[in-house]
Structure formats: structure tokens, C-alpha cells
Amino acid sequence: MDSENAWVLERVKLYELMKRQPDWSLRRYTRELKHDLQWVRRWAARIMSATALTPRNVSQSFACPASSPTAHP
């Protein structure tokens, strides 16, 4: 499995855990998934703001802000 697929799987695990245990704290998710708090906080916020879990919002492109094209002279 390539690294991007591994990260997508980790995000899906967080989503599933949040669905099964909505009353857990971010620190509890952190302990359960063995990720740092910053990672869990970032992805929990993105998951909660999404209307539905789709491949788009667990992919790396969802993680990175859109960049504007560079103007060429």
C-alpha cells in the first residue's frame, strides 16, 4: 500500500471512530489511533465540516489549500 492510501485509511479510521464514539474527546481519539493531537484535531474538524465522507474529503487534495495558477509573463 502506498503512503497516500495509508493516510486515507487512517482518516477513515478516525471518521469511523468519531461515528461510533461521538462523546470521546480529541485526546481519546489520539490515544486510540496513535496519532498526535494536532493531526486528530485537524482531521476531526475537516470531517465534521464535511456534509458526507467522500474520497475527495479524505484525500490529500482536501488536506492542501488550493493554489492559484502562477502567471507567466
Image (tube, rainbow, N blue to C red):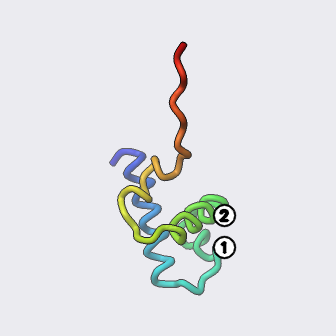
Tag shown at residue 37:
2
Residue at image location 33% in from the left, 48% down from the top: 1
Q: In the image, is 41 to the left or to the right of 56?
A: right
Question: Which of the image's four quarters has the C terminus?
Answer: top right
State the residue in front, 66 or 18: 66
Location of residue 24 with respect to 12 vertically, above or below: below
Location of residue 22 with respect to 2 vertically, above or below: below
Q: CA distance from mark 2 to mark 1?
A: 6 Å
State the residue in front, 45 or 35: 45
Relative image position of residue 64 (x, y in whole percent): 53, 46
Rendered image quadrant of residue 49: bottom right
Q: Are marks 2 and 1 in contact (CB under 8 Å)?
A: yes
Relative image position of residue 28 (x, y in whole percent): 62, 76
Residue at image location 60% in from the left, 83% down from the top: 24
Tell me the crowding category of disc 1: few under 14, some 14 to 19, or many 20 or more residues within 10 angstroms, Cα based.
some
Q: Which residue is mark 1?
A: 27
State the residue in front, 63 or 18: 63
- Give the residue type at disc 1: Arg
Tell me the crowding category of disc 2: few under 14, some 14 to 19, or many 20 or more residues within 10 angstroms, Cα based.
some
Describe the element under mark 1 as helix, strand or loop. Answer: helix
Location of residue 19 with respect to 56 vertically, above or below: below
Residue at image location 52% in from the left, 43% down from the top: 66
